[in-house]
Amino acid sequence: MVIATGLALAGVALLLAIIPFNYIVMAILIGIFGLGLATITIANYALTADLIQPTAYGTAFGLLFAIIKAGEYAASLVRDSPIDDAYQFSIVFVIIALALILLSIFPFFLVRKLPAVRLE
């Protein structure tokens, strides 16, 4: 639920960022976007720790770190894309914002009761 909230916050803030506002409103939107991304990042590590066995922490966190870094690299590719040059970032913001909002709905279909992990 926390990850979905973070995705929705970041998506809405990014979607509103294409509307021309003054600097104060843009600063507030940047703060909301940052809060959404921070919520996603912290919750991902906690969720990973909850879902895996304690003996596999190194592998799981290494894989999660690799996925995060691949996402950061993909973001730089989107930033330098021809779509970005033609539409001055506005269409790129809309596409990414809609993807974040749609992804925020996705976890509700995957929620299930997880068994408690017993540490021995």
Image (spheres, helix red, strand yellow):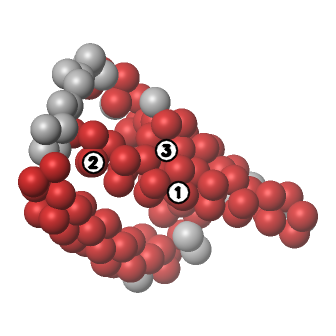
The residue sitting at 52% across, 57% down in the picture is 37
Q: Amino acid at mark 1?
A: Leu
Of 9 and 48, nearer the camera is 48
User: Which image quadrant is residue 28 in?
Assistant: bottom right
Distance (Cα) linking label 1 and label 2? 19 Å
Number of numbered discs overlaid on the protein picture: 3
Q: Earlier in the sequence, mark 3 or mark 1?
A: 3
Residue denoted by label 3: 7
Residue 14 visible somewhere in the drawing: no
Residue 24 relative to residue 117: left or right: right
Distance (Cα) linking label 3 and label 1? 7 Å
Of 50 and 103, nearer the camera is 50
**Label 1: element kind:** helix
Labels 2 & 3 near each other (Cβ < 8 A): no
**Label 3: element kind:** helix
**Label 2: element kind:** helix
- Please determine whether, in this image, residue 114 is positioned above or below residue 91: above
Residue denoted by label 1: 37
Q: Characterize the local packing of mark 2: few (<14), some (14-19) or many (20 or more) Cα atoms within 10 angstroms.
A: some
The residue sitting at 26% across, 68% down in the picture is 65
Q: Nearer the viewer, mark 1 or mark 2?
A: 2
Residue denoted by label 2: 49
In the image, which disc is placed on residue 19? none
